[in-house]
Image (spheres, rainbow, N blue to C red):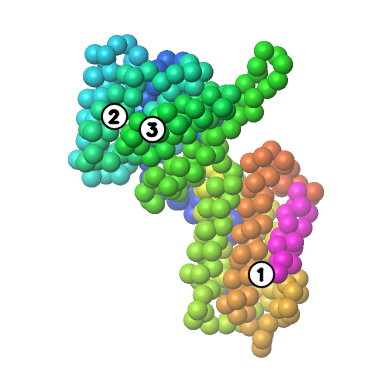
């Protein structure tokens, strides 16, 4: 079975596109008074600069939907919250109706999955009307049980934010968590800069609060927690290895080692979707040719496998010219971990995709893969 690098790269692109297409649509309601920093928060947590000023399709008098084509996230914003008690009551009803409509549709893509209630910490106090509104909404939410997360925005100094957090927690509201954060760095009187913090914690809270079928989507759209993306991607590697090369895997001859490739393609596609990075066929061709095969060669053919196995401590060249499940899993794990590191480099801006496709970039990818192979598992 021969699979050349060009064909492999195209298969990976096809699977990436399919995974993105299959992502469930995540829907979040965000409530808070004008000036709490909702737009800044949205753009700090999610990619695509979703909350551009003035963008948003009116859904009701009190709610507008912020979304973009081919992006699996909608934010339901509530710009009229601080226009008086009557407006707040109307808003509660409209959000409740929106939630019930989603539930009635029986379509997870149309359901509301979470609410963020934002309070500006710099005001130094929580108004009773806000506590009352959260409590009233929680009562309406008893059946649907939409997770409610209270977010303390512009939460510096941290000591003041901690006091406000403890006060809200003492109200015994039916909420998931109170999360203090500072979405972007804040200059204080030109004397020093408060460093942004807390958006990564918000993602961790969301991962626990949302159903499992929305975790792929959250990881794809979020840009606030790199460690969460890496950990989730490592789970994809582990699942791929367990499914394909676990107990009962029959050793295969080197000449048939291309049979391993579909699992590795699916793994790479899954990791790419988690990072939400747009990759090209040329980029994937460069990655594959730098790791498990040369351009035009049989991917994981006999010679390539034999050379790769020499890099793995204690493995040698295999038993009887065959690859065991443990060795196949080791190869796949090394490939996946190398790809995570390369995605991390692009994510952090350490190297561009274009640079990685050059000679120096290919050498870097080759070195990363070899380093992963040499690690004792």
Nearer to the camera, 30 or 350: 30
The residue that mark 1 highlights is: 377
Nearer to the camera, 369 or 63: 63
* First in residue order: circle 1 vs circle 3: 3
The residue that mark 2 highlights is: 135
Q: Residue at x 61, y 66 (%)?
A: 332
Q: Position of residue 339 (x, y in %)?
A: 64, 54
**Left or right: residue 13 compared with residue 168:** right
Residue extending farthest left: 104
Taking the magenta stretch, the answer to whether it contains residue 344 is no
- Nearer to us of marks 1 and 3 is 3
Q: Position of residue 360 (x, y in %)?
A: 80, 49
The residue that mark 3 highlights is: 170
**Left or right: residue 358 compared with residue 333:** right
Nearer to the camera, 248 or 263: 248
Name the secondary structure under disc 3: loop
Per the rendered image, the range of residues in magenta is 361-377
Q: Position of residue 301 (x, y in %)?
A: 66, 73
Q: Position of residue 57 (x, y in %)?
A: 35, 22
Q: Quarter of the image holding residue 83? A: top left
* First in residue order: circle 1 vs circle 2: 2
Spatial distance from mark 1 to mark 3, Cα to Cα? Answer: 47 Å
- Nearer to us of marks 2 and 3 is 3
Characterize the local packing of mark 2: few (<14), some (14-19) or many (20 or more) Cα atoms within 10 angstroms: some
Name the magenta segment's main secondary structure.
Answer: helix
- Nearer to us of marks 1 and 2 is 2
* First in residue order: circle 2 vs circle 3: 2
Spatial distance from mark 2 to mark 3, Cα to Cα? Answer: 13 Å
């Amino acid at each position: 079975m021969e699979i050349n690098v060009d064909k492999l790269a195209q298969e990976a692109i096809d699977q990436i596109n399919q995974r993105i297409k299959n992502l469930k649509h995540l829907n979040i309601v965000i409530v808070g008074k004008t000036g709490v920093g909702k737009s800044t928060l949205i753009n700090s947590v999610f990619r695509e600069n979703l909350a551009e000023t003035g963008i948003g399709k009116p859904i009701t008098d009190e709610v507008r939907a912020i979304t973009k084509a081919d992006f699996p996230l909608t934010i339901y914003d509530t710009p009229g919250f601080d226009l008086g008690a009557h407006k707040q009551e109307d808003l509660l009803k409209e959000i409740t109706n929106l939630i019930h409509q989603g539930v009635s549709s029986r379509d997870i893509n149309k359901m509301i999955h979470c609410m963020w209630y934002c309070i500006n910490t710099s005001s130094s106090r929580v108004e009773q009307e806000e506590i009352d509104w959260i409590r009233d909404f929680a009562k309406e939410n008893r059946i649907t049980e939409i997770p409610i997360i209270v977010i303390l925005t512009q939460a510096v100094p941290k000591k003041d934010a901690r006091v406000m957090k403890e006060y809200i927690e003492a109200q015994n509201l039916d909420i998931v968590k109170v999360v203090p954060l500072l979405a972007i760095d804040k200059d204080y009187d030109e004397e020093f800069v408060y460093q942004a913090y807390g958006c990564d914690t918000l993602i961790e809270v969301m991962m626990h609060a949302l159903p499992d079928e929305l975790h792929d989507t959250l990881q794809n759209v979020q840009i606030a927690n790199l460690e969460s993306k890496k950990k989730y991607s490592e789970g994809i590697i582990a699942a791929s290895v367990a499914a394909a090369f676990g107990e009962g895997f029959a050793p295969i001859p080197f000449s048939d080692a291309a049979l391993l490739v579909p699992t590795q393609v699916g793994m790479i596609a899954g990791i790419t979707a988690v990072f939400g990075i747009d990759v090209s066929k040329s980029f994937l061709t460069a990655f594959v040719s730098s790791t498990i095969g040369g351009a035009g060669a049989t991917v994981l053919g006999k010679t390539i496998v034999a050379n790769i196995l020499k890099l793995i401590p204690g493995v040698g060249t295999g038993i009887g010219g065959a690859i065991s499940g443990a060795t196949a899993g080791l190869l796949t794990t090394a490939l996946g971990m190398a790809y995570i590191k390369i995605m991390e480099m692009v994510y952090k801006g350490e190297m561009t995709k274009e640079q990685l496709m050059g000679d120096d970039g290919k050498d870097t990818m080759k070195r990363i893969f070899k380093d992963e192979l040499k690690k004792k598992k």
